[in-house]
């Protein structure tokens, strides 16, 4: 019985390791794809995308540039205050992650 539990424990650890590698690969591909698909005026916003891990090992895709706040506006669109028109969304984040998976 104890031997079976050890084997199951080893199998679950191996599976968890493979799962972490798979998710890490998806995150890497997503960062590359988001950088490629991001709108480029000066390139600061596009080059600011990185992958970060927290203390628990969770992976996040973040934009570290000074223009990171515009990600939500670009992704979902916004109203231009000057001309009172709606600027269409550019689904660069969603589409990039979808391609990476």
Image (cartoon, rainbow, N blue to C red):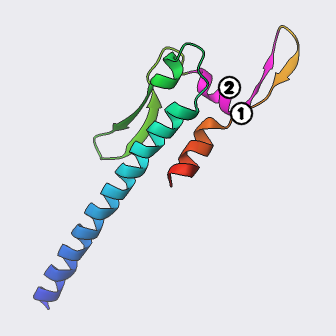
For residue 26, side relative to residue 69 (left or right): left
Residue occupying the far left of the picture: 3
Task: Calculate the distance from the C-alpha at mark 1 to the C-alpha at mark 2.
Answer: 6 Å
In percent of width and height, residue 79 lies at: 81, 20
Residue lying at the far top of the rendered structure:
82
Name the residue furthest right. 84
Quarter of the figure with the N terminus: bottom left
Packing grade of label 2 (10 A; few <14, some 14-19, many >=20) is some
Where 19 sits versus 37, above or below? below
Left or right: where 13 falls relative to 63: left
Q: Residue at x 37, y 51 (%)?
A: 25
Residue 91, picture quadrant: top right
Element under disc 2: helix
Q: Residue at x 32, y 39 (%)?
A: 54
Location of residue 94 in the rendering, given as x and y in whole percent from the top left corner: 61, 43
Label 1 CA crowd tier, 10 Å (few <14, some 14–19, many 20+): few
Report which residue position mark 1 lands on.
76
User: Residue shown at 36%/58% (left/top)?
Assistant: 22
Residue 80 on the magenta segment: yes
Q: Is label 1 in a helix, a strand or a loop?
A: helix
Q: How many marks?
A: 2
The percent coordinates of residue 7 (x first, y second) are 16, 81
- Position in image of residue 60 (x %, y %): 42, 40
Q: Which mark is residue 24?
A: none
Q: Dot 2 corresponds to which residue?
A: 73
Q: Residue at x 58, y 38 (%)?
A: 93
The range drawn in magenta is 69-81
Relative to 44, is 95 above or below? below
78 relative to 94, above or below: above
Residue 77 falls within the magenta-colored stretch: yes
Marks 1 and 2 in Cβ contact (< 8 Å) = yes
């Amino acid at each position: 019985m104890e031997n079976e539990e050890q084997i199951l424990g080893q199998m679950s650890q191996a599976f968890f390791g493979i799962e972490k590698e798979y998710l890490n690969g998806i995150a890497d591909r997503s960062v590359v794809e988001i950088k490629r698909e991001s709108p480029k005026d000066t390139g600061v916003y596009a080059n600011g995308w990185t992958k970060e891990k927290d203390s628990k090992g969770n992976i996040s895709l973040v934009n570290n540039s000074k223009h990171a706040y515009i990600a939500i506006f670009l992704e979902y669109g916004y109203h231009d205050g000057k001309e009172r028109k709606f600027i269409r969304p550019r689904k660069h984040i969603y589409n990039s992650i979808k391609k990476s998976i």
